[in-house]
Image (cartoon, coloured by chain):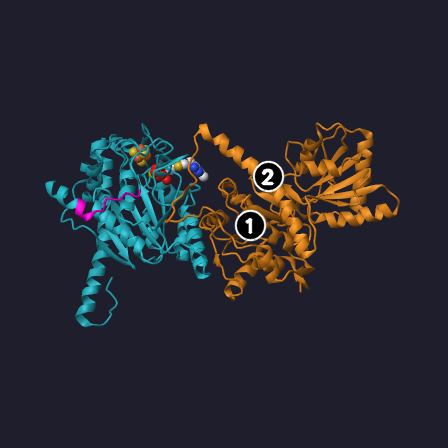
Amino acid sequence: MATRVGIEVSIAIADAVKLANPDVVAAYPITPQTHIVEHLAELVANGELDAEYIPVESEHSAMSACLGSAAAGARTFTATASQGLALMNEVVYVAAPMRLPIIMAVANRALSSPLSIWCDHSDLMSVRDTGWIQIIAENGQQCVDNIICAFRIGEDQRVLLPVMVHLDGFTLTHVIEPITFPEQSDVDKFLPPYKFPMPLNPDKPVAMGDFAPPVIFTETKWAQEMNIRASKKVVVEVWDKYEKAFGRKYSPVEKHHSDGAKVVLMTMGSVGETASVAIDEMRDEGQDVGQIRLRLWRPFPFEELRETLKDTDVLIVLDRAISFGGPGGPVASEVKAAFYDQAKKPRIVSFVGGLGGRDITVAGFKDMVKKGTEIAKSGSKNEYEIYGVRE
Amino acid sequence: MEKYAVYVPRLVKKRENFAPGHRACIGCGEALAVRLAFKALDNNVVVTNATGCIEIIASQLPFTTWHLPWIHTLFENAAAVASGIEAGYKAMKRKGMAVPENAKVVAIGGDGATSDIGLQAISGALERGHDFTYICFDNEAYMNTGIQRSSATPFGAATTTSPAGKKSFGQFSWKKNMPEIAAAHNIPYVATATHGYPFDLMAKVRKAVDTPGPAYVHILSVCPTGWRSATDTVNRQSRLAVQTGVFPLYEVENGQYKMSINLPKLRPVKDYLKIQGRFRHLSDDIIQQIQERVELEYQKLLEKANNVTKRAKSKSKTGTAKASAR
Ligand SMILES: Cc1ncc(C[n+]2csc(CCOP(=O)(O)OP(=O)(O)O)c2C)c(N)n1
Ligand code: SF4
Ligand SMILES: [Mg+2]
């Protein structure tokens, strides 16, 4: 029987990692990720999780140790946030082309400066092009489910890619939520033992991480791109299997009354729950509005998005990061690219908000939808707007 | 010389772990040192290699010079990668999963990867006590990127970022003492070696790898390209570094210092400096400064080694452990 308990989301993530039975955890503490790794250290110290916990001296070394452990064939987990993710950036890039299925939870937090420990997606965007599969969780339950799915997705022999599970710092990491935990025996059935096909082994020597001259570099990148594109099928397949085993369904683009709605609000991360309350209230008031949430950030679900929004007139996208001096919201610009060459496309309005932990309330989302609809009608040429900024 | 021809094949096995056919410059002392180091080991070794000359000359898709499992990821993280490999094997073994029997992890890097950009990762891995060996192949500059100074570049040496000029005599700082830094971590084994003393080098690498826990070996590796010296004198340069006291050979075993070679008298440093283009510009005054510094450092080292000998003697005489008089 699955058990449902009230638990802090960070602790729940550590418990989910424990259910996946990793061999190595290498991590360095940073707010708001700390409770995840502290609890993992505790599980190892108590003998509840049989793994090596490497208390590394930096995030750069955390991800480097993960490379080594995954290359040795060990199931490997780490977690970080913000400056930690920025410090390990160089190493994050190495994992995907080397086909090392490391799993990492990222407790999203703004990047300095000014220093902020609170949530936005500037750290998430800093690793956009690292080649990792990236899943965005919206609540504690989704964190637990997707941590377990991440191991199965990354380790699938057709994929062999690292996977990040993003969750909003504080709004998720530090809140207590009711969460249903799968039984260990069911997780064991769902997640087969990890077998890395080409581990470092003196009996069968391999060379990993050779340098590539121009004559072959392009081909390695092409292979990497084909690899992550093809992984989308497996992500969906694993989510379907997860639904069959545990009853909770995930998909790359999740819909909330968006079918047929003329105005749709698009969110990514924990604000989606507040936004859906706003959407429900507006629908009760008789407005033709809906919502979609992006669950899969990489590989980007182009087809699913086009299909979902085929009848939409106005799409309002909320970003929690800015591409400075560029198009504004990174998610919005991606969505615009997805529709650029489509014959029928919604008018796309880009808002940036919720930076450095700034709240957007239910009333705020209602206002945003109203404003967004007006901007769409007015034909404004503004690239984007920072919601609620005092200029 | 003839004697060597007879004995060497008997002393050293034929098997190479670092094969010929790589892309090192002619006379590369670093490639020679790497070859000797890994010849000293069996094939139960996993290598993690920092970016630098050795990585670049020995790997190019789709080729490799290594007969051992080998991984390169970045410049400053070879020791951290080693921690992960060691921990991975350890956990998997404990959990009854298939892992290679008795596999040894060896991290290697140049002086830049070791004394500069990777120092933090090395310190972390040594301090955490992973069972691995770190070998620094010290050619005293960033050679792979074109002979820029590192903190291991010796005082007075001209490099592309510490050039000699009207207002500069080259490298303005004294060589960072990396073996001492490693020893300060209280790890079980630290040693220095150089390819001019091949059997000493091989014995030390072997000992380091056989030592449970972290071990560190610092190998002076002559780079004729970067040192602007003759390619047929690399072993002579290596031996002169030792005989002048510039690069003393010693071991630190569980904190006990031991000199590897007994030198009744040091040769003048000039003998070593004058055959290298990187020191060509030095005035007698600077050379004198180097001479004094080398003697001072050598003396400090001898005292550490002598103290150990004294302590051991006094201990055996009285049969009780006395605090050594410092
Ligand atoms: C983070 C980072 N900074 C700089 C470089 C450029 N780089 C590559 S190798 C190297 C120097 C290597 O010097 P050393 O470690 O002494 O090895 P050597 O080539 O001398 O054997 C440098 C500066 C890099 N690859 N990565
Ligand atoms: S630059 Fe020096 S260390 Fe590098 S390959 Fe050439 S001789 Fe060897
Ligand atoms: Mg060097």
List x then y, in percent, for residue B16.
28, 43
Q: Is residue A70 left or right of residue B50?
A: right
**Of B38 and B304, which appears nearest the observer?**
B38
Query: Above or below — where is B177 with respect to B28?
Result: below
Residue position marked by numbered label 2 in the rendering: A230
Quarter of the image with the N terminus of chain A in it: bottom right
Q: Residues within 10 Å of mark 1 (few under 14, many from 20)?
A: many
Residue at disc 2, secondary structure: helix
- Check residue B108 in the rendering and tell me which mark sits there, or answer none: none
Give chain B's shade: cyan
- SS of the residue under disc 1: strand
Task: Name the mark nearer the viewer: 1 or 2.
Answer: 2
Using the image as rendered, state which of residue A302 and residue B131 is in the foreground: A302
Where the C terminus of chain A falls, by quadrant?
Answer: top right
Report the span colored magenta: B9-17
Instruction: Give above or below for A138 relative to B64.
Output: below
Query: Where is mark 1, residue-wise?
Result: A103
Asked where in the image residue A325 lies, by quadrant, the reply is top right
Nearer the observer, B201 or A311: A311
The reply to whether residue A366 is visible in this rendering is yes
Residue positioned 20% across, 60% down in the render? B309
In the figure, the orange chain has which letter?
A
Locate residue B44, reporting x and y percent: 34, 51
Q: Chain of mark 1?
A: A
Q: Locate residue B209 relative to residue A391 in the image: left or right.
A: left
Image quarter for ligand 2: top left
Q: Amino acid at mark 2?
A: Ala
Cα separation, mark 1 vs mark 2, equals 19 Å
